[in-house]
Image (cartoon, rainbow, N blue to C red):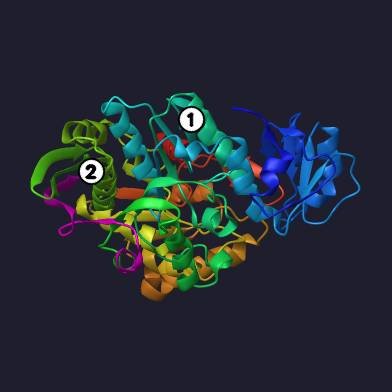
Amino acid sequence: MPDTTLTSLAGLVAGRIAGDGGVPITDVHHDSRAVTPGSLFVAIRGARADGHAYVDAAAAAGAAAVCVEEEAAVLVPQLVVGDTRRALAPLAAAVHGDPSRRLPVVGVTGTNGKTTVVHFLEAIAEAAGLTPGIAGTLGARIAGRAAPLGHTTPEASDFQRLLAAMVAAGVELAAVEVSSHALHYGRADATSFRLAAFTNLSQDHLDLHGDMEAYYAAKASLFSPARVEAAVIWVDDPYGRRLARETAVPVTEVGRAVGDVHAARVSTSVEGSEFEVVAGGDQFSVGIRLPGGFNVANALVAAACALELGIGADAITAGLAAVARVPGRMEPVLVNGGPAVLVDYAHTPAGIAAVIGAARDFGPRRIVAVIGAGGDRDRAKRPEMGRAAAAADLVVVTTDNPRSEAVDSIVSAVADGARLVAPERVVVEPDRRRAIRAAVRAAGAGDLVLVLGKGHEQGQDFGDRVVPFDDVTVAREELADR
């Protein structure tokens, strides 16, 4: 690509140039520690730090120019704009050659299920002979190679660089999770989506959005004709039905029993599910190895996306069947002689209810659930999480990621919610390892233990430190010691 100059970027963001506008820009960064020679440093005002305090550091690291809201005393050229955060995405997209316009991008949003849908789409693309790229909660993969990410949807500068790397690697289908935080903060701005998929919406992230209406509005903003060509929407969810009515883009409605794409003859077990995908006048059989009725929904959304992209039934069937495991999503932990254990990322009231409901379908004698809530996050959902967990036969309330909050206050809020439903079935153990140990030892023959909340995470965040902690590893160790 030809060099992009500061002058050529100014018009995209209604900016004013101070200094040499002809300086070439080769990359865009929002973190001064990541600045490379020739790049543009965009100074963003954040909750904990103001990037304007780091313009000198960025210049010293080799930044060719800086983008600021107020002209600074710095020796490199400056692009002065009204809102650096909103300028970040269009600047990064332009410098990287608008990568989303050079490959089909599927954006998957919703409270639960995003990660699994993206992994299904990756496998379907591979089965169709296409080179896939994915990004989300578990990181990124470009043509099968792993790449770490800091957020479910990276900051705009990193996201556009990631998409450019996918283009350079020959990716033919990109499937990315689009979080409500990303939509709120503009991380996915300046991205053209071939498809946007909606899974569901339930209480989460209200510490950011304030209420469910604002949360819905953030998700719905992805489905604008200016951003996306078409939509795939799960309409068994009430917010999905509303979104299908309100969006102005063409919609493929997906549901368990009704919709443009739906299922027939569903059979579920702890080993997975088998069902027919019905799409218009076509029908084909699929089998998935991820247990739970909600994974039937995730598979249907992925299948509908693939059909919309012109991928055939054979590749969809093969791709869905190929996904044997998504880390921390209904992940089995098996030790000879021990009770069955499943680890899942469920950390919302609806997610917890869905996992326990799916577990009931497996026919266990009893369900023992380990659950905690994260600190410094949506406090209102904590008692609701406890109420949802009380659908289990025994609830062990513990820590999740306390962050800067007192452990006892978080645990008490969850436990109080559970006790409103089943006071006699609630045990409190703030230490997460001991909680998992208690659940495993309380489980008998034919019982099922659910370890919920952290899923794939490899550490426990106490605010001033992160302690290594993996639910799968700990559950396996406690099963072995049982």
- In this view of the protein, which residue sits in the foreground, 372 or 127? 127
Q: Residue at x 87, y 50 (%)?
A: 72
Whether residue 19 can be seen here: yes
Looking at the rendered structure, the secondary structure element under dot 1 is: helix
- Residue at which label 2 appears: 270
Q: Helix or strand or loop: what does disc 2 sit on?
A: loop
Q: Is residue 182 left or right of residue 27?
A: left
Q: Is residue 186 above or below residue 149?
A: below
Q: Position of residue 188 (x, y in %)?
A: 52, 49
**Residue 408 in which image quadrant:** bottom right
Residue 431 falls inside the magenta stretch: no
Q: What residue type is labelled 1?
A: Met
Disc number for residue 93? none
What's the magenta region?
A: 242-269
Query: Where the C terminus falls, by quadrant?
Result: top left
Q: How far apart are marks 2 and 1 (CA)?
A: 36 Å
Where does the image place residue 231, in percent across and percent down from the top left?
33, 54
> Which disc is residue 166 wearing?
1
* 293 lies above or below 239: above
Quadrant the N terminus occupies: top right
Front residue of 337 and 159: 159
Where is residue 464? Give x, y as percent: 72, 49
Q: Earlier in the sequence, mark 2 or mark 1?
A: 1
